[in-house]
Image (tube, rainbow, N blue to C red):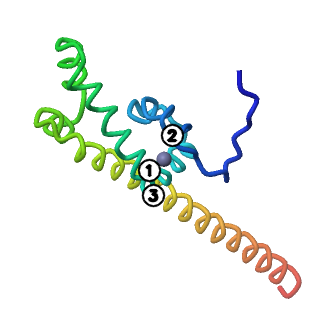
Amino acid sequence: MSTKKHDSMESMTCKDFRKMIDAFDKKQLDIDTMSRFVEHVSGCLDCQEEYEIYYIMKYALSDDEIMDKEIASQPIPVQRLVNSYDFKALVTYRLREAASKLDKIKRNDYYNRCLFAIAQFCVVLMAVFYIFSNVFM
Ligand SMILES: [Zn+2]
C-alpha cells in the first residue's frame, strides 16, 4: 500500500502514467488527473509508445468475441482506426479528444468566472443606484 500523496501541481511520472492508461482509455480519470496524463504523454515518447502498445495488446491480441463487442461500443472514428490496426493514430485521436475536452472545460470555467464578475458588478451598481435614489429623491 502506498502512502504517497498526489499533489495536483505535481507532474506525473512514467510509472504513474503507465498505471493510468487503462483508466484513461475507459474515461475514468478525473479532470485534474486527465490533464496531467495528457501533459505527460505529449512530452514523453516512451509513454506514447507504451500507450500504443496498450492498444496493440487490447485489440490485436485479445479474444475476438470480447474485442468485437468492445469495438462496437466505440465511436466510428475509433472503430475505423482499430479495424485498420492504426494504433499510433488511435493514440493521437484519443489524446486530441481529451485535450479538446480539457480545453472546453477551461474555457467554460473562464466564462463562468466572467459571468460571475459581471453579475457582481450589476449587484453593486443596483445597490449604488438604490442608495443614490433614496438619498436624492
Ligand atoms: Zn513517460
Name the amino acid, label 2: Phe
Q: CA distance from mark 3 to mark 2?
A: 12 Å
Disc 1 marks which residue?
Answer: 41
Contact, CB < 8 Å: mark 1 with mark 3? Answer: yes
Q: Nearer the viewer, residue 128 or 71?
A: 71
Q: Secondary structure at mark 3?
A: loop
First in sequence: mark 3 vs mark 2: 2
The residue at label 1 has a CB less than 8 Å from ligand 1? yes
Contact, CB < 8 Å: mark 2 with mark 1? Answer: yes
Name the amino acid, label 3: Gly
Residue 136 picture location, percent across and down: 85, 88
Q: CA distance from mark 1 to mark 3?
A: 5 Å
Q: Which mark is residue 43?
A: 3
Q: Secondary structure at mark 1?
A: helix
Q: Is residue 11 left or right of residue 133?
A: left
The residue at label 2 has a CB less than 8 Å from ligand 1? yes
